[in-house]
Amino acid sequence: MKNVLILAGLLLVSSLAVFGQGYDAMPADAHVIPIGVDGTAYADLELGVQGGTLNIANIEDPKAWNNHTAHETSTTWFTYRMHKGLVALDHITGAIVPDFAKSYEISEDGLVLTFHLREGIKWSDGTPLTADDVLFTYNDVVLNEDVDCNSRDGQLLPDGTYPICEKVDDYTVTFTLSTIFRPILNSIGVNIMPKHKLAQYVHKLNPDVPAGTFNETWTLETPLDELVGNGPWIVTDYQVNVSVTMERNPYYYGYDPAGTQLPYYDKIVSHIVANQDVSMLKFRNGEVDVYGLRPEDIPILLPESASKDFSVMITDLATYGTTWFLINQDVGLADGTDDEKRELYRTVEFREALAHLIDKDTMIQNVLNGLGAPQWGPLSVPSPFYAGRDYYGGPITETDAVIFEYDPALAASKLDDLGVVDADGDGWRDLPSGAPLTIELNTNDNTLRVGYCLILQDDFRAVDLNCNFQVVDFNTLVGQLFSSTGDLIYLGLTGGDEPNSGSNVYNSCGSLHAYRYSACEDPDEVDLRIDELLGLGANTFDLDEAFEYYKEYQQLLAHQLGYVYTVLRTFQYAHYNYVGNAQAASPISTPGGNNGLLTELCFDRRI
Amino acid sequence: MLTYILRRTLYMIPLLLIVSLISFSLIHLMPGDYMTTARLNPQITEETFRAQVARYGLDRPFIIQYWFWLKNVVRGDFGKSFDTRMGVFKTLFFGNRLLWTIILASTTLVLTWLLAIPIGIYSATHQYKPSDHVVTFLGFLGLSIPNFFFALVLLWLLVVVFRVGDHGLGVGGLLDGRFYDASMSWAKFCNYLWHLWPAWLVLGTGGMAGLIRLMRGNLLDTLQLPYVQTARSKGLTERVVIYKHAVRNAINPLVTVLGLTLPTLVGGSVITAIVLNLPTVGRAFFSALQRQDNPVIMGALLFFSLFLLIGNLIADFLLAWVDPRIRYN
């Protein structure tokens, strides 16, 4: 019995050592989220109480616990919840707001960014968090060539240098830029890592460990009590292929206006499931509380919602990213074939004719069960820079949208004008010279994309364009894209709020400028103006000014029809009614996403 | 016998070498590689992309990649997973994956045999009677339904038709959430059983039909032999004739099957394990295949091949053991 008591005592002490007890009182510099405060975006939410477990489902296992060397969202879903950066994205306004920094300012010349950190905040193990941790993260991890870090590219300034990060005092850091570069605000908020835990694994700081050690630090075999973070959640249990449990960080700096520490939930359990079908079964079985659903799930879930006491939330918010087909204007260039076809694809009137043939309504109705929205531009709709808004962050009015209406008759007459008519009487339109024209349309094995392509093929054939649609392996498709060997390729790209992150795609020399790589050597006027606008938008901290540049940029790209945009899914989810404040879920930050301020902070378990 | 085993073990080396070369070529023939998805990420610059490709050695010609891999393997270094940055076998066996694979495989094996042998005997002794047909039909049904489909249908039945969630029971995985941090108890043990029976059912029905047919056929053959007639004419009861004399001989060839079943149980449960959310080595292999994590794919293929060869060896060895007429010299 005595041994049992000693063991229990030891366990208690060790669990306190790992988890600490939290703050004695709400820190003066706490980040107060204005839940229920009138006049804020959080006005409709209600104050909650602490307790309970939130159950969600993820499709894949995490691959490691190291935020900065992670390559995939199955890992960052967890690390973004353990670590937070200086600034974050407000999920409702889309604006950059202070997160771990309580405020920041930009010098008059726009070259020095000063961040004021929250004072008195601690890591989850109780160690104080100071400017040294920020410097360590930025200088010794992110910018360290020895670390295989994806966020380093985002720090690159147009002149090829990186910002210089310096400490002013324990709670102030500055970033000095060589040139004004507004998008740096999006990427500078890298998640802060604990120096006291990780400095020993950085070769530069500890020559005793071999180069590259940091890349193999905080892997899955690291004992979980080694993981220390400043975010709302800390991983405390991992059952391989089954589940990951995260518990509240007792030292998280987020509070509600009543002084209750966030998150309200004590635990979040992510069940790892094989696919969306199993995920939905688990939701219907009551094992998962919130589920980001697919259009095809709605007819099954709606009838069940009353008897099982859950809500199906249908929103008209378009999700992030773009869906398009590209018309390869370099087709046959590499091997000197298809000259006439290439010439035709380079004619903007021909691309306009194809754009008028996209029956977006049918795509939305048939493929997305009506739960989609047409897309016309290169930037994600939720972005505050989206050109369908009237001003930066303004409401979406689509006043200046560039839209090619579905109009087969107009398309046919445009084709006739170009001389693309049926010359040999076989029922298909031919090239102006009379040679047969076959449009090869390819996509990968993705149910939605295949559905879109089948409709597209019908639309093309309806005006006698011979379109040959084929599903090919994803990697083969990517190969076609990069080698310019495809014809029409249907794919999508992920997207964010920052227009400049598309520069790799739309800059004439960008590595994803896949509709015409030759534009790098031989840009036309539009290409040059697009390059110029990208530069101008990035070179000012005045958001309204940047908005005007990006608006013109989006309109130009829409007219240029390199990537021809189609339709997007809108954001739908279902939640059991015992999850309070679940209406705060958004496509940016749901239990399914991991950007910015996490809406699950405001969720609570209702009795 | 010892020299025989030694010789067979030595034969494995060139076999594994050939297997590794073929596997490596097949992996190389798949379009794209580990870095292909990264190319579509607009945030990653061309320079970073190239640096990563070089870091993983994916820019080298196939034969050079193979040579480097082989050189390291001979030294006992199977490389590190691109994804987890842990050793290949650590990645494959991480968490109790190896243990769970063995538990799942062995319990399924035992259950299958415990059911299939009596059913086979029953089937043989009731040849062409309606009950024989029923048993055979059910066996074939189990064999012909694809495992992943059976598993999905089973989950659907549990959730939608039987509504097990109303009784607080989960589907898939090893345990319900409330038992994750509970210490071992009778209730927890029962919860494990609740989560394992669908796997036994799905995997077991798949393997049972063949075994039933084999047992049935063997026993029918044996029952025709003169010594069975002698036993009968001596006035022994039918029970003694069948169980003491006929079954013991009829079961001998099945021992070979036992050795050969082991590798299929380890590698063959991949899809079922994915649908039912069970932590097995096969699942880690599948995930590596999807991500084109070459070192892990190679490690897993070698592991499975080794298992297959050992299974064969065990089968031969067992056969010699149970049948004194067989000698390998």
Image (tube, coloured by chain):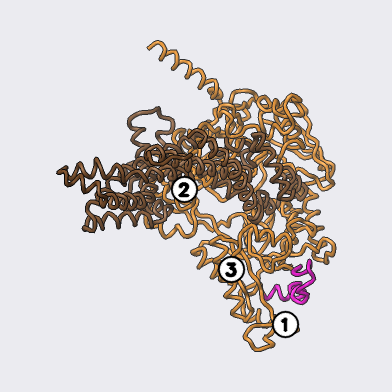
Chain colours: A orange, B brown
Q: Nearer the viewer, residue B44 or B101?
A: B101
For the residues carrying marks 2 and 3, which lies nearer the camera in this image?
Answer: 2
Element type at marker 2? Answer: helix
- Looking at numbered disc 3 in the image, what kind of residue is underneath it? Cys
Mark earlier in primary sequence (3, 1) = 1
Element type at marker 3? Answer: helix
Range of residues picked out in magenta = A329-353
Q: Answer left or right for B9 relative to B24.
A: left
Q: Residue at x 23, y 47 (%)?
A: B228
User: Is B278 inside the magenta-drawn segment?
Assistant: no
Element type at marker 1? Answer: loop
Q: Residue at x 53, y 40 (%)?
A: B8
Q: Answer left or right for A115 relative to B254.
A: right
Which residue, given by chain and number where applicable, does mark 1 sit on? A435
For the residues carrying marks 3 and 1, which lies nearer the camera in this image?
Answer: 1
How far apart are the two marked residues, 2 and 3, measured between alpha carbons? 35 Å
Which residue, given by chain and number where applicable, does mark 2 sit on? B268
**x, y percent for residue A234:** 55, 32
